[in-house]
Image: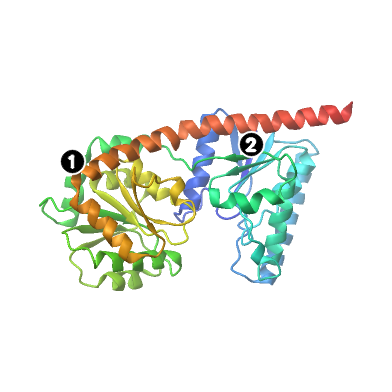
Amino acid sequence: MRIAFYAPMKAPDDPRPSGDRTVARGLIAALRLAGHEVAVVSRLRSWDAGDPERQARLRRLGERLADRMERRSGGRPPYDLWLTYHFYHKAPDWLGPRLSEAWGIPYVVAEASLAGKQRGGPWDRGYHASLDALSRADLVLGLNPADRPCVLPALRPGTPYLDLPPFLDARPFVAAAGERENARARLLSRLGIADDGTPLLLAVGMMRADQKLKSYRILAAALKRVESPFRLVVAGAGPAEAEVRAAFGQENPHVHYLGAVPETDLPELCAAVDLYVWPAVKEAFGMAFLEAQAAGLPVVAGLSGGVANVVSGGVTGLLAPEGDAVAFAEMISRLIDDAPLRWTMGAAAQLHVRERHDLPVAAAALDRALTAAVEGQREAKFRKAV
């Protein structure tokens, strides 16, 4: 089928890397793998930091854009289905509800969230727009189980809700894991370090002055309590880099910074290290956890949002209470000191991703759900006509 794809938070081809962009690209890849035609119909970014006047302008812009797209279609639906990925009060969907209704096609939502506390606040307009969009949805795809309780009450009775585990294309990570020794040698050579067997830890995260910086600070506090030898490799860059470096200590010989790492280099980087560590403060679920596990890495993660939906605690990694640096340190120490446990968890992690979070698994689930949505609407139109 022909699918209109829209991501109001960040377009799939946005130059700035993020988990949000990764998930959007993954959805498109899964839909195409299932045999569907996907068109990114707009790059309008409706995100706003809390300025009501700017929100009003964005709404007007969205309405004009929807008018233009409807006129250009000449009254004939150019698509069989509309799919909007990730809207919420800060980034509402001003296009999907309007155009799907005008064209008479199913309106599908992936990873929507709704926060009642935003009613009457700086994002009241976006909150009500999200509430309205959910009331019009024909299918909701939930990637984060934490969103379900707030989203379900906003749906029309009988609207299907599919729990779709976050996913990625595991193939490049599995392939890189098969060359682990070579990947490790290349990384150590890049860092100018001899391989003395010291466990290598990896953290991947943009350096922003928000929850990312909080995660880095918790990680730094935890590592100061770890007595066993280790080296931390940090992949990431951003405006808060000075604060991140200060948290670990400016001249810390155990911490190595790679800067921003291209997505294409992540599989080999994951394969080169021994353990992935990230406190995940206020993370939705963390695509980097899936990437690390796909490369056969055990992880130590903070238990926030939907992290437990991608990391199986005690099986593929260890989960510490969110923000608890002491517990995080204890778990890192445990896996640094127990190489057999790292290997066992790493093998389980890769199997976990391939069975539950791999691209073909998601493609099949998406295909079934979207086909049912289209067929359901056709049946409803037929019943109404007769």
Compared with residue 203, is residue 30 higher up or lower down, i.e. above or below? above
Q: Position of residue 331 (x, y in %)?
A: 28, 56
Task: Residue at 42%, 64% (x, y): give it.
Answer: 212
Q: Dot 1 surroundings within 10 Å: few (below 14), some, or many (20 or more)?
A: few
Compared with residue 173, is residue 134 higher up or lower down, i.e. above or below? below
Q: Position of residue 124 (x, y in %)?
A: 70, 66
Q: Dot 2 surroundings within 10 Å: few (below 14), some, or many (20 or more)?
A: many
Q: Residue furthest right?
A: 386
Marker disc for residue 181: 1
- Single out the mark in the foreground, 2 or 1: 1
Task: Residue at 33%, 65% (x, y): give it.
Answer: 325
Compared with residue 88, is residue 375 higher up or lower down, i.e. above or below? above
Disc 1, SS: helix
Question: Marks 2/1: CA distance?
Answer: 43 Å
Amino acid type of the residue tagged 2 in the rendering: Ile
- Look at the image and name its color scheme: rainbow
Q: Which residue is mark 2?
A: 3
Compared with residue 337, is residue 171 higher up or lower down, i.e. above or below? above
Instruction: Decide which of 314, 121 is in the foreground and name it.
Output: 314
Please report whichever mark, 2 or 1, sits nearer to the chain's N-terminal start.
2
Q: Position of residue 295 (x, y in %)?
A: 31, 41
User: Would you say residue 342 is visible in this rendering?
Assistant: yes
Rendering quarter of residue 56: bottom right
Disc 2, SS: strand
Pointers 2 and 1 in contact (CB under 8 A)?
no
Rendering quarter of residue 119: bottom right
User: Is 200 on the left or on the right of 383, as rendered?
Assistant: left
Q: Which quarter of the image is occupied by the C terminus?
A: top right
Instruction: Decide which of 162, 374 is in the foreground and name it.
Output: 162
Instruction: Decide which of 44, 142 is in the foreground and name it.
Output: 142
Task: Residue at 70%, 51% (x, y): give it.
Answer: 153
